[in-house]
Image (cartoon, helix red, strand yellow):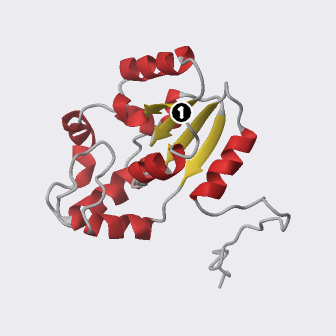
């Protein structure tokens, strides 16, 4: 029998030098301020389910007066996204759906993306582009990735704290949110 190559204990080595890895809003804001310039765009790409309000409240408040461009402003309306994913979601069935080849770009209106890109390009001072799809709005500048474990996403669904990508379904049964995330959101964001 062939031995499995699955790594049950994955890890990433972090150098031991001071300041390489920081923890807490104050330390993160200080680190970002050190590596960015006044003219630079900070792009904070977020996995679906990241609490954007926490980032705005705790991180952006510490970085000072900065123009914030929300990637979600370029999403298609929820009804259009619902129709896009409908063939794969298995309707109201609590379990069955289909994996698909959808991409993040398919959730965004190209005209709205162009409008946001123009906002970023014409900004007078520092700009932060925030949210799932932020890299679609601006592909230059300092890229930061805000990740979220899928287990935490599930817990947030159960507490009605988050909605699916491009949806306004905070109050939907969490198992249906989970199914939509499994078959669509997580695949698209991965």
Residue 69 in percent (x, y) is at 45, 30
* Residue at image point 27% right, 49% down: 88
Question: Looking at the image, is 74 positioned above or below residue 114?
Answer: below
What residue is drawn where x is 42% and y is 48%?
A: 52
Disc 1 residue crowd, few under 14, some 14–19, many 20+, Cα 10 Å = few
Residue 118 percent across, percent down from the top left: 49, 15
SS at circle 1? loop
> Where does the N terminus fall, quadrant-wise?
bottom right
Between residues 28 and 90, which one lies in front from this camera angle?
Answer: 28
The residue tagged 1 is 65
**Front position in the image: 149 or 26:** 26
**Residue under the image location 22 percent in, 45 percent down:** 86
Lateral position of residue 154 relative to residue 171, left or right:
right
Residue 95 shows up from this direction: no
Please report the residue visible at 56 percent of the width from the left and 46 percent of the height from the top.
62
Q: Is residue 32 above or below residue 159?
A: above
Examine the rendering and report whether any part of residue 169 can be seen. Answer: yes
Toward the viewer: 81 or 65? Answer: 65
**Above or below 39: residue 94:** below
């Amino acid at each position: 029998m062939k031995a499995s190559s699955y790594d049950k204990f994955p890890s990433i080595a972090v150098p031991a030098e001071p300041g390489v890895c920081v923890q807490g809003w104050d330390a993160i804001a200080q680190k970002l301020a050190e590596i960015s310039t006044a003219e630079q765009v900070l792009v904070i790409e977020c996995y679906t389910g990241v609490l954007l309000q926490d980032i705005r409240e705790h991180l952006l408040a510490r970085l000072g007066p900065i123009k914030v461009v929300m990637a979600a402003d370029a999403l298609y309306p929820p009804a259009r996204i619902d129709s896009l994913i409908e063939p794969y979601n298995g309707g109201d069935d609590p379990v069955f759906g289909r994996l698909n080849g959808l991409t993040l770009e398919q959730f965004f209106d190209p005209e709205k993306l162009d409008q946001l890109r123009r906002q970023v390009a014409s900004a007078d001072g520092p700009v932060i582009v925030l949210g799932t799809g932020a890299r679609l709005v601006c592909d230059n500048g300092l890229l930061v990735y805000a990740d979220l474990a899928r287990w935490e996403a599930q817990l947030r669904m159960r507490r009605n704290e988050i909605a699916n990508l491009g949806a306004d379904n905070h109050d939907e049964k969490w198992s249906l949110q989970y199914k939509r995330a499994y078959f669509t959101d997580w695949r698209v964001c991965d």
